[in-house]
Amino acid sequence: MPTYDLADRSALVTGAGSGIGRAVALELARNGAAVLVADLSADAAQRVTDEITAAGGTAAAAVADVADPAVHAELVAAAGRMGPLKVAVNNAGIGGEAAAVADCSTEGWLRVVDVNLNAVFHGLKAQIPAMVAAGGGAIVNMASVLGSVGIAQSSAYVATKHAVVGLTKTAALEYSAQGVRVNAVGPGFISTPLVERSLDAATLDALAAQHATGRLGTSEEVAALTAFLVSDAASFVTGSYHLVDGGYSAH
Ligand code: NAI
């Protein structure tokens, strides 16, 4: 695995208690960042924090519902206590109801919009001024390959992930001159609790076959791209949407 120099900075990762967020938190810590492990689940956040510190890294746990606009200033402040905030990964997300659009409940739709989209907006509002004050930084918003193509029975998820891509591009245009890069990552289907919880074995096999690789991805494969994007090695990369989808969208 490549190593980037993320020393002397803090990194805020939301939804870091599980799956992709956990792998991102571990990878950023391995590259030297002091990581704020934020999650809805206190146990999960603490477990990942313990994993990082056991491996010799620096981390602290934070319990937060990213759908609450007020928590983002607290997360930025907590990360700032570990070092200048120069990295944020807005990763927390939920799948939502499996239903055709006319059958989706309004409550279900609004919760997905709150967690997958509004939370990224609230996060950027808190993170960007802190990064500007720290002399610059890099943000990754976790979209999905479903930020560029649709899939049946997931309208809220697909709509929010497309919106995250647009929000990412706009924020990048607005803050590039102040040294803040903003990119989106679009994973294909990745073996995480989110996917394994909601899909049966036959559906997982069928999905695997839709990737050129013939398999689902791993959280570590998404973390590798994310670590590159937030590192100085990606200094000319901003405002773009980076797929890590095993060829899912190539056909
Ligand atoms: P996961 O369910 O394994 O982990 C998500 C974590 O986020 C959990 O620890 C959960 O407690 C936390 N979380 C959920 N709602 C939260 C909230 N309101 N506030 C704070 N934390 C919250 O999910 P996974 O698969 O790791 O997904 C992470 C991100 O990657 C999501 O944005 C998801 O949409 C995206 N993604 C996942 C793909 C996959 O195939 N697993 C594919 C493409 C994108």
Image (tube, rainbow, N blue to C red):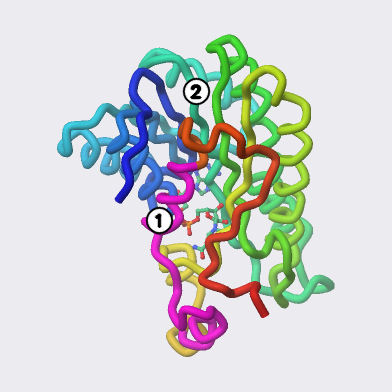
Q: Is the CB atom of the residue marked by disc 1 within 8 angstroms of ligand 1's nearest atom?
A: yes
Residue 44 marker: none
Judging from the image, what secondary structure is the residue with disc 2 in?
strand
Q: In the image, is residue 109 above or below residue 29?
A: below
Please give the residue where the numbered disc 2 appears in the rendered image.
Answer: 86
Sooner in the amino-acid sequence: mark 1 or mark 2? 1
Magenta part, dominant SS:
helix
- Amino acid type shown at disc 1: Gly
Please give the residue where the numbered disc 1 appears in the rendered image.
Answer: 19
Query: In the image, what residue occupies the spot 49% across and 39% down?
Result: 14
Mark 1 or 2: in front is 2
Judging from the image, what secondary structure is the residue with disc 1 in?
helix
User: To which quarter of the image does residue 247 belong?
Assistant: bottom right
Query: In the image, what residue occupies the spot 37% across and 47% down?
Result: 22
Crowding at label 1, few (<14), some or many (≥20) Cα neighbours within 10 Å? some
Measuring from the top left, give residue 63's x and y in whole percent. Answer: 43, 33
Query: In the image, what residue occupies the spot 29% across and 42% down?
Result: 48
Please give the range of residues in magenta. Answer: 205-228
- Amino acid type shown at disc 2: Lys
Inspect the magenta stretch and tell me whether residue 212 lies in it.
yes
- Give me the C-alpha separation between circle 1 and circle 2: 23 Å
